Amino acid sequence: MKNKKILFIHHGQIIGGAPRSLKNTIIGLEKEGFENIKVLFAYADLKSFFQEGTNIKVGNIYANRMIFGRVLVGLSSIFNIRAFIYFILEFISFPYTVYKQYQDIKKEKVDIIHLNSSILFSVALASRLANIKLVWHVREVVIGGKFSLKKRFTGWLIRKLADEVICISEVEAKALGHDTFNNVHVIYNFVDFSSFNSDNININEEKKKYNIDNDKKIAISLGGVSFRKGTVEIIQTARMMYDVLFLIAGSCPIRNEYSYLQWIFIKSIHSIEDSFKKFGLKNIYSYYYEQRAEWLYFESNLKNIRFIGKVDNVVPLIAICDILIFAGCTPHFPRPVYEAWALKKPIVAFDMDGISDNIENDIDGVIVNENTCYGLSNAIPSVNSRMGKNGYKKAMERFDMNKNIEKIIKIYGEI
């Protein structure tokens, strides 16, 4: 089995939970004696990240914007004008995309293809045409109501095309629908606990990097400015809690110049969205989101919130915090929650599918029932260190690399 060639397909451009989990999978496979591993990238940005600390080969695979897969899964809405246009263009060019990807993977002469995201439908079809065994790693919750035909079709299609499906928690597995093909498995993402060790971190030195007052409680969020990470709600919360320092790692708000007409137009859209939220027609902020975060941040002139930019190694940042905030506003797996637990840090998280399912309220974290700044500001004071210790036990149980890599190897063997 260990001499089989495994070809991973990765879709993203940034160092987030999916590439970190995939890299840990590759490291685990190499430790078990797998030597013939290659990763093809839709975008070349992460090649150096994957090659550091591994012996894998890397390459490229033909790709478009992958809006088609994002719409099916629910990460993008067809009612967004830009997404709709890209969706139509991709739909027209879909046969060509599948053909090009078929060519790319056929020439690799591999035994197993392992997709690293549920949005890679064209690659899945290309794999079936090439008659190559397919493992499909589902890292996203397929979004839709109980009677959503799109959700049911998407889940069926993933289960039908794949020989085996790996979901990163029970939530993602449940969203795929009934396991009619008996090929859905739950294997949690990996955390390399050896790298999440605060013993070698000088807390005082790390705090000096960010000019942090030792008397202030520190809350961090990983994800920058994104509607999926609840950035606006965190900024709003900072306006209400001056005794807490909020650090946000990732993309930063940028102060832009707008004409008067642009300003009026965007403000009008924001007002419409506020009305939609007030009357329950919309659950989250998403319209001109970067502008909302930008204006809220710069106009507030807050001293207790800092955007610290991209952070390649989040371990020291988590080590200096008192609380990790995961204000996820769309269903997805909360990898940063487990990373915080690996360092015995307590967490506060919004009540959202795929997020709160992993947390026992008041045991290993606090679930915010009202996903607003008011709910968040009320939840933060109730966090205590005991929750971080309880979370550590759960993380050790679910995220052990050795146990989970054995499960993946078993799946490879079965196909």
Image: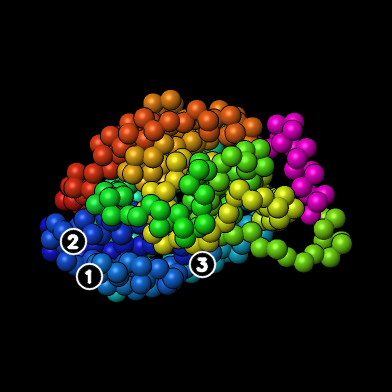
Helix, strand or loop at label 3? It is loop
- Is 43 inside the magenta-drawn segment? no
The residues tagged by marks 1 and 3 sit, at their Cα atoms, a distance apart of: 28 Å
Residue 17 circle label:
none
Crowding near pointer 1: few (<14 within 10 Å), some, many (20+)?
A: some
Q: Which residue is mark 2?
A: 30
Report x, y in % for residue 84: 65, 56
Dot 3 alpha-carbon crowd within 10 angstroms: few under 14, some 14 to 19, many 20 or more: some
Q: Position of residue 278 (x, y in %)?
A: 74, 33
In the rendered image, residue 221, in percent from the top left (x then y), is placed at: 50, 48
Question: Can residue 156 be seen?
Answer: no
User: What secondary structure prevails in the magenta region?
Assistant: helix
Going by the numbered disc 3, the residue's amino acid type is Asn
Residue that badge 3 annotates:
64
* Residue at the image position 44 percent from the left and 41 percent from the top: 322
Please report the bounds of the magenta region as a residue range: 266-284
